Amino acid sequence: RTIALALFAVSAAAAAQPALDVIKVAPRPVAQTVAVEATVEAVKQATLGSQVAGRIVELPVKAGDTVRAGQVLARIDARAADAAVAASRSQLAEAEANLANAKRVHERNKALAAQKFVSQAAVDQSESAYQAALAQVEAVRANAGSAAVARDWTTIVAPYAGVVGETLAEMGDMATPGKPIVTVFDPREMRAVASVPQATLAKAKLDGARVDLPALATTLAPVRATVVPLADARSHTSRVRFDLPPAEGLVPGQYARVRLPVGVATMIAVPASALLRRGEVTGVYVIDDKGAPRLRQVRTGEPVGDDEIEILAGLAAGGTIAANPVAAGLR
């Protein structure tokens, strides 16, 4: 009698459970995609270095800092540059004094030549000296401007507002022309760059591409796709840039996967939420003839459509599966 009551209680509990949500399995046309690997990069990214040699005396930023356009990122020892500017100013003052003297001599000779006190040769000679002094002033003035520009090179500023990605030197290091010091990028404009095989590119619809970001567990629809008009002769691929909308957590160097639609194929696909993963086994709960869910292993393919997975083996058309594998497992 106790066993009968227990079986009756279990039967009553099973009858009281709500009906499972089920999905009919049937082949249907699904957009076929090809996945290619990509890397996230910033549209605006600059590696800044020094144009003059000197010791780094100030490095007020570090990786991750937000900077504004024109903000000082590093300073190089400017004592030699300041000395060069002072020397060029002194040379300019001397050249201007020589010019003023040559001008007075030339004007005096012209006045004396009008009164027949000096020859025309003396006037020509003074004019030549005046023109030479004038050219000397222009040359020294140009050198002074060059020295001032070289002094400005000792201060490295941000070319635009952004984020410091990396500092490649430390305060006290010796800076040399061409040696990178700091990297800055604009996080508001990011893109995914992929090398797409030319055969795939010929039939792909770039306007329907989707970019998967596993690190962020999200998928983005690119704003624009641009094909670089060059092909790699070794790999026979072309670079395609997919401009991404703003997203939290995007940083240069992140791994991405671009899914390119290349046509339509008839296949069996089920929602990803209907799959049950236990270790290396992937399965679904199939509803048998008596309405009971039975776990069956399946072999999956690539993601297709909107959050669906292609089923390569394990399911046949006409069957029924549970939409919620957790609720089916509790049965």
Image: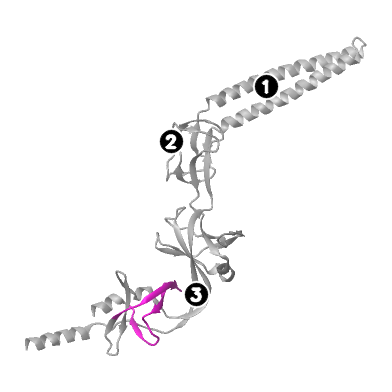
Q: Of helix, strand and loop, which one carries label 2?
A: loop
User: Cα distance, mark 2 to mark 3?
Assistant: 51 Å
- Specify the label residue 170 is tagged with: 2
Above or below, 320 against 59 in this view is below
In front: label 3 or label 1? 3
Q: Is residue 207 magenta?
A: no
Q: Quadrant of residue 291?
A: bottom left
Q: Report the side of 61 relative to 160 (left or right).
A: left
Circles 2 and 3, Cβ within 8 Å, touching? The answer is no
Residue visible at 87% across and 16% down?
123
What residue is drawn where x is 59% and y is 69%? 202
Q: Residues within 10 Å of mark 3 (few under 14, many from 20)?
A: some
Q: Which mark is residue 32?
A: 3
Q: Is residue 219 above or below residue 63?
A: below
Which of disc 1 and disc 3 is earlier in sequence? 3
| Residue 331, percent from left and from top | 23, 80
Name the amino acid, label 3.
Gln
- Residue 318, by quadrant, is bottom left
Under circle 1, the secondary element is helix
Q: What is the chief secondary structure element of the magenta stretch?
A: strand
Residue 92, label in figure: 1
Q: Residue at x 44, y 56 (%)?
A: 254
Residue type marked 1: Leu
